[in-house]
Image (cartoon, rainbow, N blue to C red):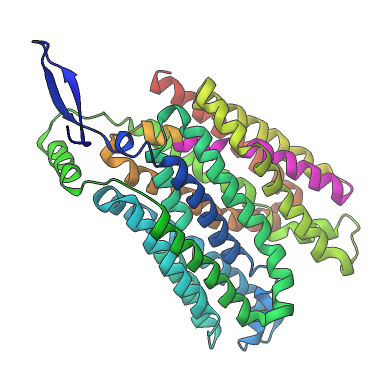
Amino acid sequence: MSSTVSTTPTALGQPHAQPRGYAERNVQYWRRNLVVCVFGSFTTLVSLSMLLPFLPLYVRQLGVTSQSAVIQWSGIAFGATFLGTALTAPLWGRLADRFGRKPMLVRAAIGMAVVMSLIGVAHNVYELVALRLVAGLVGGYASASTVMVGTQAPRERAGWALGILSTGALAGNLVGPLVGGVLPDWIGIRGTFFAGGAMIAAAALLTIFVVKEEFHPASDAQAHARDAAGTPVRRVNYVVVAALLVTAMMVLLANMSIEPIITVYIGGLGVGAAHLARVAGVVMACSALGSMLTAARLGALADRFGSWRVIIACLVLTGLAMVPQAFVTHWWQLAALRMLMGMTLAGLLPSIGKLARQSVDESRTGRMLGYLQSAQFSGQVVGPVIGGVIGVHLGLHAVFFVTGALLIACGGLAHWAQRRAGV
C-alpha cells in the first residue's frame, strides 16, 4: 500500500483507497520542523530588530544631517519591512498551497540573508529604505513558518505549536535590540548587518537539510480543480474570517500604538535624559517578555477549552490592562503593566491561527494564514501611526484609552463571530 493512501470500508465492506491529506502525511515531521521554524523565526527577527538601537546612527552615517530628518527616515526605514511583508504574505501563502511550505521557508531565508548583507553596503538612505522594503517583500520567514506549523501540526495540538512558534518570534524581537546595542561597538554598524545575514544563512541551511515535507503537487492541483468544478468543500464563513483578520490586526496595533511616543511618555514620569533611552528599551521589552511567558500555555488552553473563549478573554483583559497605563507615576509601574498586557496579548495569535486553519479547506490553509499574517503586519504599520496622531491631537494618555476601548470592542466582535460560527 502506498504511503499516500489510507483505506476506509465501502458500503459493501471492501477497503477503498483514499488520498491522505497534507497534515496526515506530514504528522511524523511536524515536531522536527517546529524546532527549526522556531530557531529560524528567532534568528530572522533578531536580525530585523537589532538595528533599532543604532538605526538613527546609521541613517546619519548615510548622509542625513538634520535631527528631524534622521527621525523621519529612521521611522520610514523601520516600517518599510513590515509594509513589504503585509503586501506579499497572501501571495506567499497561496504559493505555499501550490508548491509546498518548505520552498517558501527556503526562499524567505535565502532572500533575507542576501538582503540583510546588502543593507550593510548601502550608500545612501534611499538604498537603505529600498532594501528594508525588499526584505519584507521577499522575506517573511516567520510568516512562512506559521503556514508550515499551522498546516502540519495535528488540529488538537495546533494552538500549542503556534504558541511555541510565537514564543520564538517574540524572543527574537526581545533579544534583537539587546544585540544591536552591543554588537556595533565590536564589529561596527555595517559589520552588524553582515553578522545578521550570517545568522539567517545558518537558518537557511538548517531549513534546507533538516526540514522535511511530503508534498504532492499533482494531488493538490487536483484538489484545486475539484474545488473549481464544484465538488463540495468546506464552506467558508466570510464573516468569521473577517472577524479573525480584524482581531489579528488589533493584536499588533495595540502593542505598537504607544511605541512612537513611549520615550516621551517615560520622560514625563521623571526619568532623566541620561537614562531615558535605556529605560524606554526596558519598558518596550516588557510586553515581549510577558508574551514569552504565556504564549505556549494560552495556546494549549485554546486546544483544551476552545479558541474563541481564549480570544474573547484575552481581548477584554488586554483592553483593561491598557487603561491603568495612563495613570502611572513611575516608569517601573508602566513596565509592570506592559508585561501584564503582553501576558494577556500572547493568547491571541495562536488561537487566531488555529481558527483560521479550521475555517477553510486544507488546500487553502496557506492562503488563509498568509492573509492572517498580512493583517497582523498591517497592525504593526498602522499602530504607530494611529498612536502618534492620537498623542498629538488628544494627548498621550488618550492613546491608552482609545486602544483599550478598541480592544474591548474587538472582544465584542469576536463574541458575535463566535455565535455566527455556531460554537
The residue drawn where x is 53% and y is 72% is 198
Between 383 and 6, which is closer to the camera in this rendering? 6
Between 414 and 300, which is closer to the camera in this rendering? 300
Query: Residue 325 lies in magenta, yes or no?
Result: no
Residue 196's x, y, as percent? 57, 70
Between 186 and 213, which is closer to the camera in this rendering? 213
Height in image: 203 above or below 367? below
User: Is 297 placed left or right of 277 in the picture?
Assistant: left
Q: Which residues are magenta?
A: 329-353
Residue 200's x, y, as percent? 51, 66
How many tags in the picture?
A: 0
The furthest residue to the top: 12
The residue drawn where x is 72% and y is 79% is 186
Quick check: can you spot residue 372?
A: no
Residue 37's x, y, as percent? 48, 51
Quick check: can you spot residue 90?
A: yes
The residue drawn where x is 62% and y is 46% is 254
